[in-house]
Image (cartoon, rainbow, N blue to C red):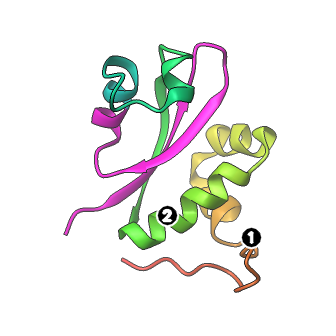
């Protein structure tokens, strides 16, 4: 079974864009080179550079973590980039917005 990844791109305007994919490098190329496969946000702010990626397991877990990543304030995303080993602190230990408690990652 393939591993899903969370990723962050840094766009030309210094903004950060997060998503999930099976292949972060390929997905970054798509955002930069293939309008039909790129998000509108990234396409309008090209070029984008892959600045962080983390394998997280199955697609269900990746989707839940992507939701949390996108809700983080920019300051916390920048802290995640400066201390990539702390990603679990930002994304796993925070309470689930749906009030379901902490998210437990499955492999």
- As drawn, the residue found furthest toward the front would be 36
Say if the magenta span includes residue 4.
yes
- Residue with the mark numbered 1: 94
Between the C-alphas of marks 2 and 1, the distance is 15 Å
Residue 53 percent across, percent down from the top left: 45, 45
Q: For the point 55% across and 57% down, which residue is it?
A: 66
Sequence-wise, the earlier of marks 2 and 1 is 2
The residue drawn where x is 71% and y is 37% is 78
Judging by the rendered image, the residue that carries numbered circle 2 is 63
Q: Residue furthest bottom?
A: 100
Give the magenta range: 1-27
Residue 14: quadrant of the picture: top right
Above/below status of 44 relative to 52? above
Residue 44 or 76: which is nearer the viewer?
44
Q: Secondary structure at mark 2?
A: helix
Residue 84 horizontal/vertical position (percent): 58, 47
Q: Secondary structure at mark 1?
A: loop
- How many other residues sit within 10 Å of disc 1, few (<14), some (14-19) or many (≥20)? few
Q: Quadrant of the N terminus?
A: bottom left
104 relative to 59, above or below: below
């Amino acid at each position: 079974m393939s591993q899903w990844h969370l990723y962050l791109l840094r766009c030309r305007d210094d903004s950060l864009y997060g998503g999930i994919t099976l292949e972060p490098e390929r997905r970054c190329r798509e955002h930069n080179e293939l309008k039909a496969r790129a998000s509108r946000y990234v396409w309008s702010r090209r070029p984008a550079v892959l600045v962080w990626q983390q394998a997280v397991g199955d697609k269900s877990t990746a989707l839940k973590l992507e939701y949390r990543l996108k809700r983080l304030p920019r300051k916390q995303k920048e802290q995640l980039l400066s201390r990539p080993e702390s990603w679990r602190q930002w994304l796993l230990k925070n309470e689930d917005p749906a009030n379901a408690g902490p998210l437990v990652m499955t492999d």
